[in-house]
Amino acid sequence: MAENGTNGTNGQGYVGTRTIRPDGVDKVTGRARFGADFNLPGQLIGRVLRSPHPHARIVKIDTSKAEALAGVKAVITRDDFADQSSEFIPAGEMMMNYRDVVRNVMAREKALYEGHAVAAVAATSAAVARKALKLIDVTYEVLPHVIDVVEAMKPGAPVLHDDLFTVGVEPKPDKPSNVAKRIEITLGDVEAGFKKADVIIEREFKTAPVHQGYIEPHAALASASEDGSAELWCCTQGHFIVRAHCARLLGMDIGKIRVTASEIGGGFGGKTVVYLEPLAIALSRKAKRPVKMVMSREEVFKASGPTSGAVVKVKMGATNDGKFVAGWAELKYQAGAFQGSPVQPGVFCAYAPYDIENVKVIGYDVVSNRPKVAAYRAPGAPISEFAVESVVDEIAKKLGLDPIELRMMNAAREGTKAAYGPKFGPIGLEETLNSIKKTEHWNTPLRKWQGRGVASGFWFNIGGETCASLTVNEDGTVSLMAGTPDIGGLRAALTNVAADELGIPYDKVRPIIGDTGSLGFTFLTGGSRSAFSGSMAIVEAAKQIKAELCTRACKLWDAKPDQVEFKDGAVRPLGALAEKVKPMSIADFAKMAGKTGGPIGGYGRINAQGAGPSLGTHLVDLEVDPETGRVTILRYTAAQDAGKALHPAYVEGQFQGGAVQGIGWALNEEYIYGSDGKLQNAGFLDYRMPVASDLPMIDAILVEVANPKHPYGVRGVGETPIIPPLAAIANAMEQATGIRFTELPMSPPRVLKALKEREAAAKV
Amino acid sequence: MARVVLVGNLAQLTGGVAEFQLSATSVKQLFQQLAELHPGIEPHLEEGVAVAIDGQIYQDALFQPIGPDSEVFLLPQIAGG
């Protein structure tokens, strides 16, 4: 029996087209249900009491007055969560320790940052819940705090954890510190490499911690039953991960928790961990009623995310003809209150776009009295690549070389040995550089106070455990179920693949995101994996359906397997058999499914391997207002290797969204702390993110260098586009002003200060 | 024999030895052989590492074949946002 389908050979050809998004109508009419839209009869409102101190020992918590308040149905504290043993688990960007997770969702011995959860209540109304929080009496012993990463590394800095000893240094320290880990990668001989260099540039960079800035705050609705089971509805990037974390933290069997992921108003990595979810279940379990919890924006800023701020030193050497011969870097990343910054991927990615024989990168993971960082789009990579790409630009200027040509000359390509070890397979950096150079944008003249910058970026991408099912309904339509929340167009992309694989019209496939009771374990939406892995699972599910239909056709037609084939949405007889019987469509089989063996479906259960890295290059024009320091983005073009765009509009949307977040990171976004260790800008009025009126249309260029390990050639695309903007903008700023900005954000006050300092220096 | 290289801090668990020649024909065998040589690395292998075989990165893939002339790198597990 023969089958076809993969690579669109059924002839429908939806893959690579801009089909109508299945979730579109409900999103624009307001019918789509996000985290805070779920309600249950009799539900209570949950609220969290948060530490006002950045660092304090919790001496005593007295909840008696709150519990006595009319309308209060449950109060929980650290006493409601069993302590956890030290065990590392994958958590978005790197390993996380359950011992830390239980302390992050509810402070135990100490409050480690302003906003750290200390207690929570469930009450009959929000007003009663707020009143109850005021009645909880917490006795704190306030401790000295440390916010800045460099200060936190100094001897004598307030130590957050008495049991934190730096890993990765010899001899092993005998005193605890805030440095959780030192890591290092080496390729070749970096000192020998610098001796070959004609030009050496060394710079120190500083980046601010930035929040993922998802529009939808964290929200959860839990309903725990007296029989020990629980249901949970929440906005998350991975409901199977939420289920696992909650089960572990609450001592429940995984199978007794059912989690449904809502539509999600952005996650960007920040919804790969749990905050409210275990609290909502614990409160519901205690109150014996459903409990709904929604974070305010202030809580989102103070108690979730962000990504690290960092200090990065870079030293690069090149020959006079532009060949990079050595690259060194030292990265110090804030982890927040618990270890686990994304410094590891920052170390690996720093020089990944380039073919350099001699590389050494050192990284430090440092805790301080800030909220624990969460993953944020290519975690760690934008920071280290910002620093390297800024220095690459300086080398180009010093040598009088075109920055694109310099990158082209040194670009990693198939066979290049990455600084972190393995050789690359087919990758598309050169193609993105070429496509940028060919744009009309690259050759447009600029005026005074305007600048143009270019930068490239690299991200690994991953696969992982993934389930997806296809069920043929009685009328021949198909229900598609995926296990990863749809954040960036998953449903449309998978529907394109399913329709092509089965040879049926796109609108005959209806996709949904299944809950944790409907599919096997599926890792979260992150690592740019969901369309890559999900489409592989769909191909597998469709393959099962096609094989089953061919088997049934053989039985109906008294034929042998080599006398039938699945093609263009039907099982077709071959050879002489074609004279006797007519092809049977999926709908034909659906009508007689009961008589031929029962319901028809396929279930893809895979651990997707073979993710291909995605590289991109961005080009930006900007203008600086010398009177105010304000920077306006005039024009922006983003080119990236997608392998194969299953749904080009969504892929372009990823490029555009990543670019916009990178623009915000470069120009405005930062966490501002007072000397009291408290966050001063926990709201969108003071934490300035770019909005549509701040930006031009982002032009997207799709480069497609097929990933040979995927049936359609797909690479993940979601993370790479946030990497190049930081340096592209800094490089454009240098051209516009003549000043090399090494500290982010390049906000109006900082730009104005730099311009005035230069003016003052010129007068001396 | 496959050439096996430990990247980053993993070599600290093998007394500083970063490169091995091993006869492993799968990731499972590779982990077993490394654990026999250096028991200190076993918990880290169980927690999860990425294995790059001839340039292709695999994660949680115990049965992935390794060729006799393969170049294998062990890296910390890779995820993302």
Image (tube, rainbow, N blue to C red):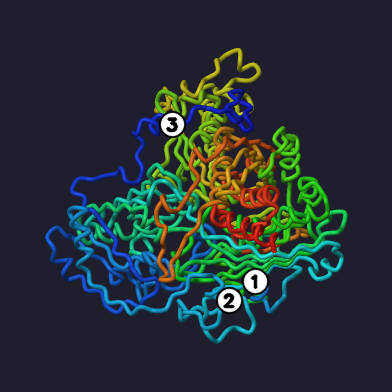
Q: CA distance from mark 1 to mark 2?
A: 9 Å
Subunit ID for the residue under disc 2 = A
Front residue of A215 and A496: A215
In x, y percent, where is residue A668? 52, 52
Which residue position is annotated with label 1?
A: B9
The disc placed on residue A546 is: none
Query: Mark 2, residues whose alpha carbon is within 10 Å: few (<14), some, or many (≥20)?
Result: some
Q: CA distance from mark 3 to mark 1?
A: 47 Å
Helix, strand or loop at label 3? It is: helix
In x, y percent, where is residue A267? 46, 49
**Residue at 42% in and 69% down:** A677
- Residue A195 visible to an observer of this rendering: yes
Q: Are marks 1 and 2 in contact (CB under 8 Å)?
A: yes
Which residue position is annotated with label 3?
A: A24
Looking at the rendered structure, the kind of residue marked 1 is Asn
Which residue position is annotated with label 2?
A: A167
